[in-house]
């Protein structure tokens, strides 16, 4: 079962996740991080700036979960731009060691295979940060995605385009296609850390943690992973059936 930690606010979740990432980097200076975009992981990156001050991060490697297809790389909302702005620059990572799937129209057909090969060559992902979509997606694996899927091109769900329209002038500007690590790819990371905040994520979180494992709710694939940490605020936890048990277990966690 995933370890579910219910926290008062997103800052606390960010601190806990940052502790996990920082202690990984201290024990393994060339750690491989799986990086998420969107609003959810931002408190983690903010907390990491403080945690990693004075730590040599020059050998840390990273792989983003996904990218829009057909977006100009220089567009501020391309995930290449977001990862550079929110992660690589503030944390002082080495830009050439942090990869984002190739979302160019010319490259997208073969980008999945190349990305999988790059992750394998790096020895796999040590710790994968994950958000979850209001429709239950992880990465951009929309409902119906195979639980065994690998990095590939996908069509975004309308719900996802509506959710992400806040980053663009209008919904018509949100790309239609993406390239995303598959669910099978994500499950190979050695530790999954999924964060979710707010009431709009409550149903997806309940389905992911406690629902049946189903491609209809891709986040439920975390139940197949032996080491998952779920960090949620009270609103995102509000539909969890066993919330009291998770609180009890966390309070009584063996040292
Ligand atoms: P959000 O997106 O962090 O912007 O809510 C999460 C996701 O879609 O995975």
Image (cartoon, rainbow, N blue to C red):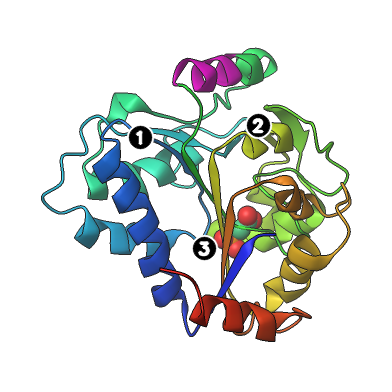
Q: Find out if the beta carbon at label 3 lies less than 8 Å from the nearest ligand 1 atom.
A: yes
Q: Find out if the beta carbon at label 2 lies less than 8 Å from the nearest ligand 1 atom.
A: no
Task: Where is residue 241? Give x, y as percent.
Answer: 79, 80
State which image quarter holds ligand 1. Answer: bottom right
Q: Quadrant of residue 24?
A: top left
Q: Is residue 90 above or below residue 204?
A: above
- Identify the magenta region: 114-122
Disc 1 or 3, which lies upstream in sequence? 1
Label 1: state its secondary structure. Answer: loop
- Considering depth in this image, is 236 or 106 the residue closer to the camera? 236
Identify the residue under disc 2.
185
Identify the residue under disc 3.
40
Q: Nearer the viewer, mark 1 or mark 3?
A: 1
Q: Is residue 197 above or below residue 28?
A: below
Measure the C-alpha gap from mark 2 to mark 1.
17 Å
Q: Is residue 210 above or below residue 169?
A: below
């Amino acid at each position: 079962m995933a370890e579910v930690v219910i926290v008062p606010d997103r800052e606390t979740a960010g601190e806990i996740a940052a502790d996990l990432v920082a202690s990984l980097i201290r024990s393994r200076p060339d750690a491989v991080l799986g990086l998420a975009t969107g609003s959810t992981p931002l408190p983690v990156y903010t907390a990491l700036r403080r945690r990693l001050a004075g730590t040599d991060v020059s050998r840390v490697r990273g792989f983003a979960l996904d990218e829009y297809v057909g977006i100009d790389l220089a567009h501020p909302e391309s995930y290449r731009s977001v990862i550079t702005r929110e992660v690589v620059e503030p944390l002082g990572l080495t830009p050439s060691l942090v990869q984002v799937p190739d979302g160019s129209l010319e490259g997208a057909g073969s980008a999945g295979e190349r990305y999988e090969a790059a992750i394998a060559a790096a020895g796999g992902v040590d710790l994968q940060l994950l958000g979850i979509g209001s429709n239950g997606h992880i990465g951009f694996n929309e409902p119906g995605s195979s639980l065994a899927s690998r990095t590939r091109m996908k069509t975004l769900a309308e719900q996802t385009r509506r959710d992400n329209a806040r980053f663009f002038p209008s919904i018509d500007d949100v790309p239609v296609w993406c390239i995303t690590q598959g669910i099978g790819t994500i499950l190979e990371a050695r530790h999954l850390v999924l964060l979710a905040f707010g009431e709009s994520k409550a149903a997806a979180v309940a389905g992911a943690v406690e629902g049946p494992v189903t491609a209809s709710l891709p986040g439920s694939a975390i139940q197949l992973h032996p080491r998952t940490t779920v960090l949620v605020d009270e609103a995102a936890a509000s539909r969890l059936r066993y919330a009291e048990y998770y609180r009890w277990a966390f309070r009584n966690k063996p040292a």
